[in-house]
Image: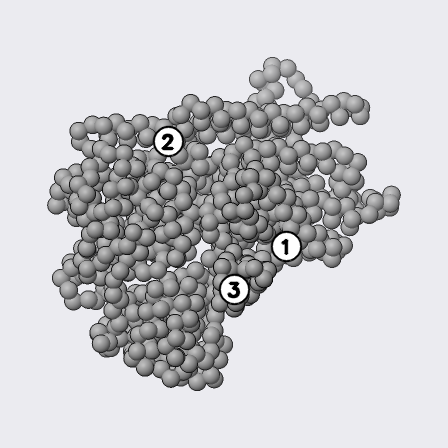
Amino acid sequence: MNGNGRRKKIFQSDMASYAMILAAYLAAELFLRSGAAGSLFKGLLVPLCIYSIMALSLNLVVGISGELSLGHAGFMCIGAFSSASFSMLMKGQGLPNGLCLFLAIVIGALSAAVFGFLIGIPVLRLKGDYLAIVTLAFGEIIKNLINALYFGVDERGAHFSLKDGAALKLAGGGRIIIKGAQGITGTPKLSNFTVGIILLLLSLFLVLRLMNSRTGRAIAAVRDNRIAAESIGLDAARLKLLAFTISAAIAGAAGVLYAHNLSSLQALPKNFGYNQSIMILVFVVLGGIGNMRGSVIAAVLLTLLPELLRSLNDYRMLIYAVVLILMMLFTSSPSFLSFRRELLLRLRGRGKDGREVS
Amino acid sequence: MKKQSSMLLAAAMLLSLTACASSGAKSESTASEKAAGGSAKWKIGAEGPLSGGAAVYGNAVANGAELAVKEINEKGGINGYQIEFKKADDEHDQEKAVNAFNSLKDWGMQVLVGPTTSAPTIAVGSEAEADNLFVLTPTGSAVECTAPKNVFRVCFSDPAQGTKSAQYIGEHKLGKKVGVLYDSSDVYSSGIRDAFVEEAKKQGIELTEDQQFTADSNKDFSTQLQKLRDAGADLVFLPFYYTEAALVLKQANTMGYKPIFFGCDGMDGLLDVENFDSSLAEGLMLLTPYSADAEDERTKNFVKSYEAQYGDTPIQFAADAYDAVYAIKAAAEKEDLKPSLSVSEIGDGLEKGMTEIQLDGLTGSGMRWSAEGDVDKEPKAVRVENGSYVSAE
């Protein structure tokens, strides 16, 4: 296959990904307009975007740069809290909603990127699983730190405390923004499905462009063979740091969406803890490491599934686990893959070599 | 190959999305059919963590509410209409709570008894405000829970409990040096503690030591207890739930540290903890609006039928939910509401009715509600003696 053919194929595949998201968007919008959509359906649209973006973000680290991050929920947490603090400060200042959300997204993404950058500097110079260990700790530290943090403003400026609200010593008229374990209450609800889809498309565009750029190929080269890549003059640490920082920024943006979708924001183990990070990793692994479209689909399916099974009460946990195993077999078991290949060949009615098989 | 499989997955995704949507639409239409028809029923939903770490509380709320619904149905329902009841799991997570709320709405819910915990209550409250759906949380105790006008609660707010505890300790001069141990990662615990510390200063109580733990380290309290002992605290305030309290009492006993321990309503349930030596709790005091050992007729009946139905002793959460359903009944009867009204009309009616009723329930007699949604009731101070509660007055 020559270079042109390869490029054409990548282009087609990228377009198919965008088309899939746009089609899903249009279908959902049409459905909403028709008036037949239930509340659960409406309420799930934004979370679906959030988790798809998270899956893309983590796939950038796991799939392209070949590192393992077990604390991606931590970056989401930073994005959520920094942006929600910003919108709380801006509340009642007459800032238009759209502009406020835009600035919030920028702030959330930037602050998460800064943390990603700072963590990446020492860790990505090392070889081995250090990033996994450090990010795991990072996610837990961030969660606990936020739970202990009190942040308030009055006319003298911002005050921080790790003790309690009274220690802020706010002057009259001051407001507490982050109230320790209670987090932020009353965040304006600015997220909506359209914004979610735009962010998702933007993240996908960013990730796919990076993948197919010179830099992206260099990152992949470092992943596949660090020694060979370094021998031709690539700066492995710098490239990995770049991918990790971008990934953190995207996760931060997802956090902004999360924070502005609910009126109360708390760092619970459930939403920003270790389990959430693992859940996002599950989306990536089941969707296919390095396969962006797959990870979006996996994120959507696995977020929907527990809600669809709600009527089964406790059994839904059981079924969820079974579905996870089946999905894993479906996407990676060798015997199933060969069965799938045979089936397709028979369907097409003509022989074709198995080179395409993933 | 990759393409085909992903297309297949995408198709599955779309299919499931429509499945999700159509099931929602179907239940909505049946709801409106029922509402329009003659055999209308009330639809009351309950919500709380039915699975996960906080499942004890969510299940207690769901069971307590269900029990009340059954009793009311047997006695002819509210204003002559039977009640349909459904519970949903929120896993103690804001996002799941909104999902659970939406699924109940799709079912046709008119009134919500829940959510159980504070953060979900705040998240659901603002969603429900848009529809003016009446929310009566049995146990969402953070101040902000009742900020929307359609949200009321049965329990005390956290600061109210902290303040009342400090007043009680100050007025009865229970301790010369008071120490506090609390869960800084928990909203309930830190909310009570903040108000307690504030009020303690006004009461002239000497606070010696302020110790904390988090949900990640709630098994070993020996360091904190040692510090409290070194500071000479002769009364230790424990504003958290009985599961941790059982460990604290055990470890304090091992150390030979014997101050007066003082708890809040979350402490109720301690004497029923499995493998807990109740002699360790001798002398423990707590301020609670409800206790399963109370001698009055109402509590006795409730505990008896709850135990028969669900097999364990009802904790305060169950009692709050039980009272919540009866409060809704009283308010609906006061305003003469019918299930055929729209959700918003029922909401308006109940918001008005709640401020006008006076309810004798399990968690207090003569309970009254303010328009802000907070309850006015008196907590009872009890002391543990010979393995059961006695009034401390």
Of circles 3 and 1, which is in front? Answer: 3
* Color style of the picture: one colour
Q: Amino acid at mark 1?
A: Thr
Q: Callout 1: few (<14), some (14-19), or many (20+) C-alpha neighbours within 10 Å?
A: many
Total labels drawn: 3
Task: State the SS at label 2.
Answer: helix
Task: State the SS at label 1.
Answer: helix
Q: Which mark is residue B291?
A: none
Which residue: 57% across, 26% down?
A22
Answer with left or right where residue B263 lies relative to residue A216. Answer: left
Image quarter where the N terminus of chain A lies is top right
Task: State the SS at label 3.
Answer: loop
Q: Is residue B310 visible?
A: no
The residue at the far right in this view is A232
Q: Which mark is residue B24?
A: 2
| Separation of marks 3 and 1 at Cα, in angstroms | 38 Å
Which residue: 49% across, 56% down?
A183
Q: Considering depth in this image, is A102 or B52 the residue closer to the camera?
A: A102
According to the image, label 1 marks what residue?
A: A135
Q: Considering depth in this image, is A140 or A325 the residue closer to the camera?
A: A140
Image quarter where the C terminus of chain A lies is top right
Q: Amino acid at mark 2?
A: Gly
Q: Looking at the picture, how far across and down is residue A198, in whole percent? A: 59, 33
Q: Looking at the picture, how far across and down is residue A226, in whole percent? A: 79, 47
Say which label, 3 or 1, has the lower sequence index: 1
Answer with left or right where residue B249 lies relative to residue B11. Answer: left
Q: Is residue A188 visible?
A: yes
| Separation of marks 2 and 3 at Cα, in angstroms | 50 Å
Q: Callout 3: few (<14), some (14-19), or many (20+) C-alpha neighbours within 10 Å?
A: few
Answer with left or right where residue B39 lies relative to residue B184. Answer: left
Which residue: 52% across, 64% down?
A170
